[in-house]
Image (cartoon, coloured by chain):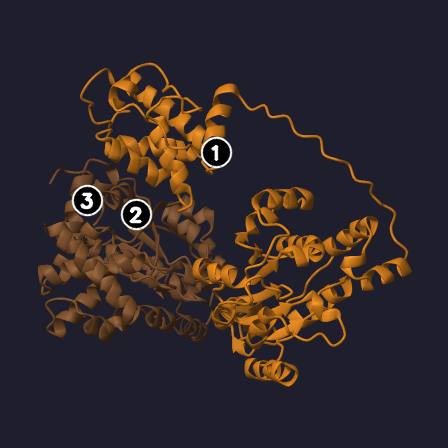
Chain colours: A orange, B brown
Amino acid sequence: MAGDPPRSAGPAEPQASRLADNLTYFARTLRAAGLPIGPGRVIDALKAVEAVGVGTRDDLYWTLHAVFVNRREQQPIFDQAFHIFWRNPQLLQKMLMAMLPSIDAGGATEEEREPMLRRLAEAFSSERDGAGDGRESEEEEIEFDAAMTYSARELLQKTDFESLSNAEIEAAKRMIAAMRLPIMTVRTRRYATDRNGRRIDLRATMRAQLRSGGAIPLRYRKPRRRHPPLVVLCDISGSMSRYSRLLLHFMHAITNDRDRVHSFLFGTRLTNITRHLRQRDVDLALARVATKVEDWSGGTRIGACLAEFNAHWSRRVLGQGAVVLLITDGLDREGGEGLDREMERLHKSCRRLIWLNPLLRFEGYEPKAQGARAILPHVDDFRTVHNLDSLDALGRVLSSPGQRRLEAQRSYRAVIAGRG
Amino acid sequence: MRQATSPQDATASSPARALPGDVDETLALLGAGNYVADRSLATALFLALKLARPLFLEGEAGVGKTEIAKVLADTLGRRLIRLQCYEGLDIASAAYEWNYSRQMIEIRLAEAAGGANRDALARDIYAESFLIKRPLLQALEADLAGPPVLLIDELDRTDEPFEAYLLELLADYQVTIPELGTVAAASPPIVVVTSNRTREIHDALKRRCFYYWVDYPSAEREMQILRVKAPRAGEALARQVVAFVQKLRGRDLFKLPGVAETIDWADALVQLDKVALDPQAIDDTLGVLLKYQDDIARIRGSEAAHLLGQVKAELAAGAR
């Protein structure tokens, strides 16, 4: 490179190439650990290191950090990778020498007591001995691929998820996958050209005028409408397990049907599964979810989970007037402790909060559980979700603006006061 | 100051100060603008300046993201062009708009003169003189003082389509106007993008920038900030304020106090003629630090007194 500043020691040519090698190798390690790093980034990194100069270890760290990390979550991975990769304190000599840093995936040296992130350990080891994990053979399930008759479908629509046979569940999954969920649209502050609009679109008018000459042909525009973000919070505790299996399919279907859908699962803790559900293949997506979630069919701590959601996620996903679907039976192991306060906050942070409760299918269901009584005053709508029909009905609920907040609150308060 | 060598800097060698030549100079530059920064931030900023890439700053509200752009414009002697984002922000108010009334008059005049050639007319009225330039386009204009600092503030408040529109600007420093063609910057502006993370910004945009997460400062760094930003607060008071705020950040609160709140609080206490913290003063001024009623209710009273006790004990232990 012509404009390269002269380096202090050694011939410039091999040094630069060794640096490039090391950086490429480092970038590949990070990529294997899951950071999205393309070849462009490696070139950037090279330029960056040349610009800063390989002065101190700290400078190199922050230089590479600026180039490679673009999410806060990536920091710990980068941090560990950096310290393991550039372990040797005599960094410059190391770079000058014609050898790649020796990586020990097992962390064999005695002084390195810190536990390596699992992903990173895998990344290092796969870099060394090449990828080669055999895929476990998956158990094949018997599939019905014949299209159902109309009446069979009709029956299936009304059957409670709880009483579906395995074969019927497969069929139901397919119907859910084909489901389209309409959701109300809200006016945005953007405009689209529209013949029946109220406002004049000056830009389009000017262009039309040039084309025609003579009288000015007015063009109109009106506000564009768009569906708000949708946030799904689904209970996967033991009491919900029969439903949550199919509801996961439902969540997968709506995630891939539109943008701005965020999905969370909670039992004893909250898990964000949005990214896993983005995977188009439903089985792959759910398999990924299964590995991520650790509290399947356990107890429920609704209050604590909602508190976590409010503290860490509400500001990130509830912007721009989100609609929240809360799917739970309201049976709380902790007796609804702190739930009232968290529900109130959740309710106040979103445009609309809809509670879906499979228990509501029973005639004369009364919100007697303490959890349910804490939730009910803070929802805008209260619906059942126990069969395919109720999922369809959910579409109608979502596409209408629904009753106003104060009315909803009053009516649900009356339910509790009257019957409780 | 060392003379910059890269070509884009050469064009900017005018009355304004030259860009910093290394990380230390960047740190000094920010220091000259009364901005106390971590070396990590200075590194990211230096890279952004050196490689002419936008700097993407993300972090909680009140940690000093916007301030960086202001200080940069101030110390480098450049013009600051600020684009505050909001929901529904569109091209007409962010980049450019045609001056329709002037265009219409022009057409009428041409018609009145008779024999208006339609093609020539189209060329005439879609000329640059009929263009109303908004912040993004202004930032591409050459400036005597050197390329301006373009601050795109709170990008997360706008929607994805606008983000997509920015891609061309951030990657190539140019804006394409369908009627006119591409307007490219004579020399690339210094671009700072900030986000409060009320939603995720798309990776395509982040890719084009250097990313930096602006975190809450350490106690030591916050002390330096207070010395610079709230000099009227005595050393003892400042120490207590910082220690107390650092303690608060360890609590389970809905909104943790940022640096801006620390500075405000120190100022507030000075206004109340306090030279040291006491439980009453904390309770009276807690609204400066915490902005949610739940948080205030949780801390006010015994909790605040308890924290203050810890702070005093630790400071006493540190002094010994």
Residue at x 35%, y 33% (from the top left corner):
A45
Is residue A396 shown left or right of residue B265? right
- At label 3, the amino acid type is Thr
Secondary structure category for the residue under label 1 = helix
Q: CA distance from mark 3 to mark 2?
A: 19 Å
Is residue A81 shown left or right of residue A273? left
Quadrant (top left, top right, bottom left, bottom right) of the N terminus of chain B: top left
Mark 1 — residue?
A118
Residue A288, percent across and down?
A: 61, 43
Mark 3 — residue?
B26
Estimate how packed mark 1 is, as few (under 14), some (14 to 19) or many (20 or more) residues with alpha carbons within 10 Å.
few
Residue at x 36%, y 27% (from the top left corner):
A85
Is residue A209 shown left or right of residue A158? left
- Look at the picture and state if A135 lies above or below B137: above
The image quadrant of residue A372 is: bottom right
User: As rendered, which of A220 and B31 lies closer to the eye?
Assistant: B31
Is residue A104 shown left or right of residue B275? right
Q: CA distance from mark 3 to mark 1?
A: 37 Å
Estimate how packed mark 2 is, as few (under 14), some (14 to 19) or many (20 or more) residues with alpha carbons within 10 Å.
many
Q: Nearer the viewer, mark 2 or mark 1?
A: 1
Mark 2 — residue?
B188
Instruction: Specify whether disc 3 shares its chain with disc 2.
Output: yes
Give the chain letter at badge 3. B
User: As rendered, which of B271 and B64 lies closer to the eye?
Assistant: B271
Estimate how packed mark 3 is, as few (under 14), some (14 to 19) or many (20 or more) residues with alpha carbons within 10 Å.
many
Mark 3 or 2, nearer chain start: 3
Residue A119, percent across and down?
A: 48, 34
Secondary structure category for the residue under label 2 = loop
- At label 1, the amino acid type is Arg
Give the chain letter at badge 2. B
Asked if the residue under mark 2 is in contact with the one under mark 3, i.e. CB atoms within 8 Å, the reply is no
The image quadrant of residue B19 is: top left
